[in-house]
């Protein structure tokens, strides 16, 4: 089969993608950097930031009827912790207006909490920083925020916290979505045919003992399902549905959820991340999968591509010569949005340093999953060359 092409469009940004080049990078990348943020946050030296990346995304309508794109971005500050800021654009491309205060800082007693939350425990767990937020829209005006929170005194101890907002102004913290250490959680925006809500998650350490499930984690190489009677929980860890580690692969070392799934005619679109170990480091790439619309947690109905849709390049981190670059050779997405004409807008961090945008076409992504299909539970190729 040849190199099929299709068009993509997000407002004034449009072009063509193909099987070989499935993501069209925005020529105006990066769309937001630390320099724009620091101009707004200059009033507080302790908020001086060195990165803007891994942003959760949402499309909302203002009180005046104007369509707005909201970006909740992660930024490293000088002491090594991360905070979450907010920027708004009228077209999702440029002219991002950064809000003067961070959207989410490590928890304090002055924050708003849901009933029953252990506030002292929350403060302890978030003291090491908050990062990589996902905006999971689960109703017309209800957004579940899932984000990673790090302990300050224990390296690599991280839980995924859940918060709720309706207006991106008031945030109600609900605490850990799961008790085991967790690094990535995204929620499907609709319940399945049984009325159950579903999520994708990845444990944070190599193996954790979970009651009723035994060991999960798989050396960061497994994505499990999660389920709950409502989007705010209580959430339970379910079965293994995606795995990697089978021979040569762009996702050989790690795999994990990226952006919240998008509903398409081909199934739930899942843009995930994967890592390959090389002699020169561990490049992060973006992968693609489609889940069944009625039963997204059934691995027998998941189509996964062995071919990444976006691999890191020098174009993904265009910075000044003296700028800090946090982690070279990384592309990572925490948010995607629908564009025009089967377009998916992928907002992604470049080298954990700047925010970028690329456009993909749903039909092309679907065809990639058909052409380069692998077994979701083993990563073994299901096609021949």
Image (tube, helix red, strand yellow):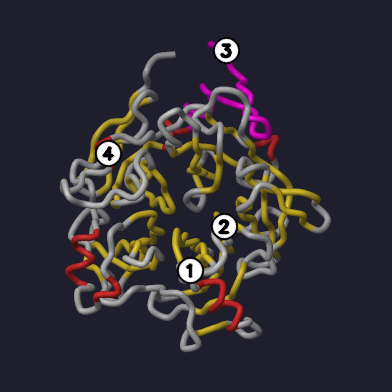
- Helix, strand or loop status at disc 2: strand
Q: CA distance from mark 4 to mark 3?
A: 30 Å
Q: Residue 187 got which mark?
A: 2
Q: Residue 25 got which mark?
A: 4
Mark nearer the viewer, 1 or 2: 1
The segment highlighted magenta reads 366-385
Which label's residue is closer to the chain start, 3 or 2?
2
The image quadrant of residue 71 is: bottom left
- Helix, strand or loop status at disc 4: strand
Q: Residue at x 29, y 72 (%)?
A: 47
x and y percentages locating residue 237 in the rendered image? 71, 56
- Please check the rendered image and state whether residue 381 is part of the magenta-colored stretch, yes or no: yes
Question: Tags 4 and 3 in contact by the CB under 8 Å rule?
Answer: no
Question: Tags 2 and 4 in contact by the CB under 8 Å rule?
Answer: no
What residue is disc 3 on? 384
Q: Quadrant of the N terminus?
A: top left
Which label's residue is closer to the chain start, 4 or 3?
4
Q: Residue 128 got which mark?
A: 1
Count residues near mark 3 (Cα–Cα under 10 Å), then give few for <14, some for 14-19, many for 20+: few
x and y percentages locating residue 111 in the rendered image? 47, 84
Which label's residue is closer to the chain start, 2 or 4?
4
Q: CA distance from mark 4 to mark 1?
A: 33 Å
Count residues near mark 1 (Cα–Cα under 10 Å), then give few for <14, some for 14-19, many for 20+: many
Mark nearer the viewer, 4 or 1: 1
Q: Residue at x 54, y 48 (%)?
A: 257
Q: Residue at x 26, y 68 (%)?
A: 48
x and y percentages locating residue 82 in the rendered image? 40, 65
- Taking the view exactly as shown, the residue that stands out farthest to the right is 212
- Helix, strand or loop status at disc 3: loop
């Amino acid at each position: 089969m040849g190199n099929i092409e299709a068009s993509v469009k997000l407002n004034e940004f449009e072009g063509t993608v193909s099987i070989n080049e499935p993501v069209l990078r925005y020529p105006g990348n990066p769309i937001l950097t630390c320099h724009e943020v620091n101009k707004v946050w200059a009033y507080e030296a302790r908020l001086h930031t060195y990165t803007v990346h891994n942003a959760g995304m949402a499309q909302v309508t203002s009180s005046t009827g104007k369509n707005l794109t909201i970006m909740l971005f992660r930024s490293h500050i000088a002491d090594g912790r991360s905070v979450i800021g907010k920027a708004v654009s009228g077209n999702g491309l440029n002219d991002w207006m950064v809000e003067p205060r961070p959207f989410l800082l490590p928890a304090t007693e002055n924050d708003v909490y849901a009933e029953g939350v252990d506030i002292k425990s929350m403060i302890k767990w978030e003291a090491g920083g908050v990062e990589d937020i996902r905006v999971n829209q689960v109703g017309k005006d209800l957004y579940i925020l899932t984000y990673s929170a790090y302990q300050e005194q224990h390296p690599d101890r991280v839980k995924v916290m859940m918060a709720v907002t309706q207006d991106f102004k008031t945030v109600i913290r609900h605490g850990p979505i799961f008790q085991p250490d967790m690094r990535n959680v995204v929620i499907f925006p609709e319940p399945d045919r049984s009325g159950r809500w579903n999520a994708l998650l990845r444990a944070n350490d190599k193996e954790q003992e979970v009651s009723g499930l035994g060991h999960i984690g798989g050396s960061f190489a497994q994505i499990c399902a999660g389920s709950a009677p409502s989007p705010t929980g209580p959430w339970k860890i379910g079965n293994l549905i995606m795995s990697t580690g089978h021979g040569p692969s762009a996702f050989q070392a790690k795999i994990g959820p990226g952006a919240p799934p998008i509903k398409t005619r081909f199934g739930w679109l899942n843009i995930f991340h994967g890592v390959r170990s090389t002699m020169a480091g561990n490049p992060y790439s973006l992968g693609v999968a489609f889940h069944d619309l009625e039963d997204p947690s059934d691995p027998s109905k998941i189509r996964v591509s062995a071919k990444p849709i976006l691999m890191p390049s020098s174009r993904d981190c265009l910075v000044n010569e003296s700028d800090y670059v946090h982690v070279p050779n990384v592309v990572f997405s925490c948010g995607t949005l629908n564009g025009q004409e089967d377009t998916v807008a992928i907002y992604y961090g470049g080298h954990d340093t700047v925010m970028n945008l690329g456009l993909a076409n749903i039909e092309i992504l679907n065809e990639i999953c058909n052409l380069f299909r692998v077994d979701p539970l083993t990563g073994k190729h299901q096609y021949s060359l």
